[in-house]
Amino acid sequence: MSEHISASVADGVGHVTLDRPQALNALSYEMIRELTAIFELWRSDSEVGLVVLDGAGDRGFCAGGDVRELYGYAAADDHAEARRFFRAEYRLDAMIARYPKPVVAIMDGITMGGGIGLAGHASIRVVTERSRVAMPETRIGFTPDVGGSWLLATAPGELGVHLALNARTMDAADAMHAGFADFFVPSDRLPHLMQALAERADPGTPAEIVMLFDETPGPSSLALARDWVDACYSAPTVGEIIGRLRDPSSSPFPLHPFDPGAIAHAAAAADELETLSPTALTMTLESVRRARTLRSLEDALEQEFRLVSWFIEQHDLREGIRAQVIDKDRNPRWNPATLDEVEAGLAARVLGTPVDEPVWPS
């Protein structure tokens, strides 16, 4: 057993914990392989009736993939190993989504990127008052993956595009509204939930048991932003989205005059977009919109794999990780530096080009 994964079976519950709290349970390649082996083993284990997936510590379930490890692959031009990492991760995410036994994911604390890949596709997704949920990839010159484009594509209206481009962090109410979570359970009730899942008295199904502890998380600020988000993020390009954010009334679909608070939030969103990688923003917009037309999570993961296979060879991903994680100067130098300099048709070309070794060989 890996030192960063702990697993046990008791009372019919397979309990697997990401145990790397000093790194907010960030996923390494070794952890992905270990999790895959555990889920494969428990699939046919008659002693396991349901699976609980959580993270050690009280700061987060999983902050995402280990970007330092990814940076090492990219810096060494070890693109083949990076692709193996992503291929294994995506297969694990799809396995959890199609798992024949209920998977209860406890998204307590920070749950981002690869953490959403694990928990966001589980059959029962629980958030708490400490949950902070996001697909933050554009902040490092990257794009939402691990099936994130699939979840973002099905969020109400244009909220998924806003969440993807701006890497906006959601609280529990936002995550439930956007379709990233199902239940809100206060963190101090999680031990009681775990006990109830082990005892499994009436009501008998895991979802019904979780409902006994479910509470209303309060209003979603994301839902309250729907008017200006839909009006602005429905624009066809990132540049036009920024233009509408600067002047929401310029949208051809304004529902009513926007209040000063909405105008201020829209302007702040525009300011934020102008600091992010033009390439990452352009690719991400195309990815989420194309995901709306796909038939399955697996199709979305395959599309994402084409993107990440391309991204790991690009300057902006290395530069984004350097600026945010390695040197922490928070001053990335994107190339190209402006949206106008991004090659026309680049996103369509990359997304439409099959890779040599896809996630699921045909």
Image (tube, helix red, strand yellow):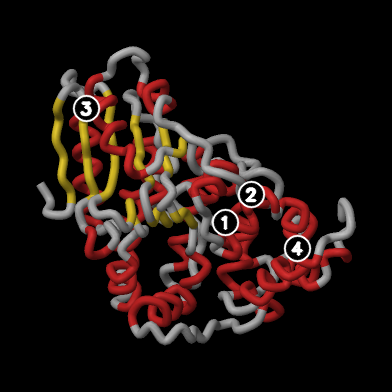
Do the CB atoms of the residues marked 3 and 4 lie less than 8 Å apart? no
For discs 2 and 3, the disc positioned in front in the rendered view: 3
Q: Which residue is mark 2?
A: 290
Residue 78 sits in quarter:
bottom left
Residue 273 visible in the shown view: yes
Q: Quadrant of the C terminus?
A: top left
Q: Which residue is mark 4?
A: 262
Mark 4 and mark 1: span between their CA atoms? 34 Å
- Relative side of 60 to 171, left or right: left
Q: Which residue is mark 3?
A: 13
- Within 10 Å of the Cα at label 2, are there few (<14), some (14-19), or many (20+) other Cα atoms? some
Mark 4 and mark 2: span between their CA atoms? 28 Å
Do the CB atoms of the residues marked 2 and 1 lie less than 8 Å apart? yes
The amino acid sitting under disc 1 is Leu
Q: Is residue 211 above or below residue 37?
A: above
- Whichever of callouts 3 and 4 sits on the residue coming sooner in the sequence is 3
Percent across and percent down for residue 217 are 52, 42
The amino acid sitting under disc 3 is Val
The amino acid sitting under disc 4 is Ala
Mark 2 and mark 3: span between their CA atoms? 38 Å
Do the CB atoms of the residues marked 3 and 1 lie less than 8 Å apart? no
Percent across and percent down for residue 324 are 41, 77
Please report the residue visible at 46 percent of the width from the left and 83 percent of the height from the top: 330
- Within 10 Å of the Cα at label 1, are there few (<14), some (14-19), or many (20+) other Cα atoms? many
Please report the residue visible at 35 percent of the width from the left and 33 percent of the height from the top: 104
Mark 2 and mark 1: span between their CA atoms? 9 Å
Q: Which residue is mark 1?
A: 351
For discs 3 and 4, the disc positioned in front in the rendered view: 4
- Whichever of callouts 4 and 2 sits on the residue coming sooner in the sequence is 4
